[in-house]
Image: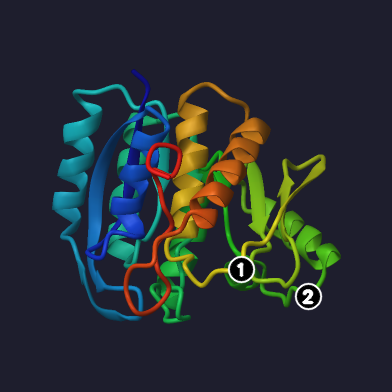
Amino acid sequence: MRTALTIAGSDCSGGAGIQADLKTMSAHSVFGMSVVCAVVAENTQRVLSIQDIDSKVICDQMTAVFEDIRVDAVKIGMLSSPNCINAVYGKLLEYKPNNIVVDPVMYAKNGQALMAEESIKVLLKTIVPLATIITPNIPEAECIANMKIATREDMMTACKKIIDLGVQNVLVKGGHYDGDAMDILYDGKQFYTFVTKRINTKNTHGTGCTLSSSIASNLALGYSVYDSIKFAKDYVTGAIEHSLELGKGNGPTNHFWKIFK
């Protein structure tokens, strides 16, 4: 069985973070493992508090996994503090895993910041250059590329700026735009566009986590970067289309929509 490891924060309400990642990996028939970097008290409406995990415990979790079980892909999500980022970075250098997907989780669905500016700088200097692919949404890409994004051409310019950080591939997600959902992939040489229909629902909690862990799962299964994104987009579109009316805010997607429709 192929395996994938998520290194991220938790979501006690189950729609995002490590909980969403593990559900997504299971839905792809991939054995999911986790390293908890932060405990996030959140629900479909708001983030109440964040507790960072001690860097030694983060390192020990990574050692426990890598010394015992083969890791076919790694998905990296919320890393909220420089200490946490440096701990993960050191272990990535030690174990050198293949197929690293970085979802730079900077903001919650309601726009609340999840990373301080200093943490973002450390992430871009350390972990991003090790990544197979980074998957920022429009606000995150604007922050990383230090520019406003209002058009498709802006998305392409941001891709070029972000790939200069050393990452192999950049996927700028256009889900914040009106109209069809358009994402742009840049591999340093060529641009690829992915367009999927937009579903009229507020229940999109955890879509970024779900997409990135789907990409990681597909990479673990041996697919190319392009095919991994294509299949992940189809999966997430179905998960949103069959989203769940849970909670009073932005409800979660249905990670097992292919099984429980």
What amino acid type is highlighted by mark number 1? Answer: Asn
Displayed quadrant of residue 4: top left
SS at circle 1: loop
Q: From this viewpoint, is residue 125 visible?
A: no
Residue 23 in the image: state x and y as whole percent.
33, 44
254 and 77: which one is in front? 254
Residue 154 left/right relative to 165:
right
- Quarter holding the C terminus is top left
In which quadrant of the rendered image does the N terminus lie? Answer: top left
Please say which color scheme the image uses.
Answer: rainbow
Q: What residue appears at the point 46 percent right and 74 percent down from the top-left corner?
A: 109
Q: For the point 42% across and 32% down, which residue is it?
A: 28
Q: Is residue 155 left or right of residue 16?
A: right
Q: What label sits on residue 150 in the rendered view?
A: 2
Q: Residue at x 31, y 43 (%)?
A: 22
Residue that badge 1 annotates? 200
Residue 221: percent from left, percent from top: 48, 23
Residue closest to the eye, 219 or 59: 219
Question: Is residue 157 at least partly visible in the picture?
Answer: yes
Q: Quadrant of residue 78?
A: bottom left
- First in sequence: mark 2 or mark 1? 2
Residue, x 23% and y 39% (percent of image)?
A: 62
What is the x, y in percent for residue 50?
24, 73
Is 35 above or below relative to 114?
Answer: above
Q: CA distance from mark 2 to mark 1?
A: 22 Å
| Residue 97, image x, y percentages | 40, 30
Q: Amino acid at mark 2?
A: Ala
Q: Can you name the residue that lies furthest to the front here? A: 261
Helix, strand or loop under label 2: loop
Is 152 drawn above or below residue 20 in the view shown?
A: below
| Disc 1 residue crowd, few under 14, some 14–19, many 20+, Cα 10 Å | few
* Badge nearest the viewer, 2 or 1: 1
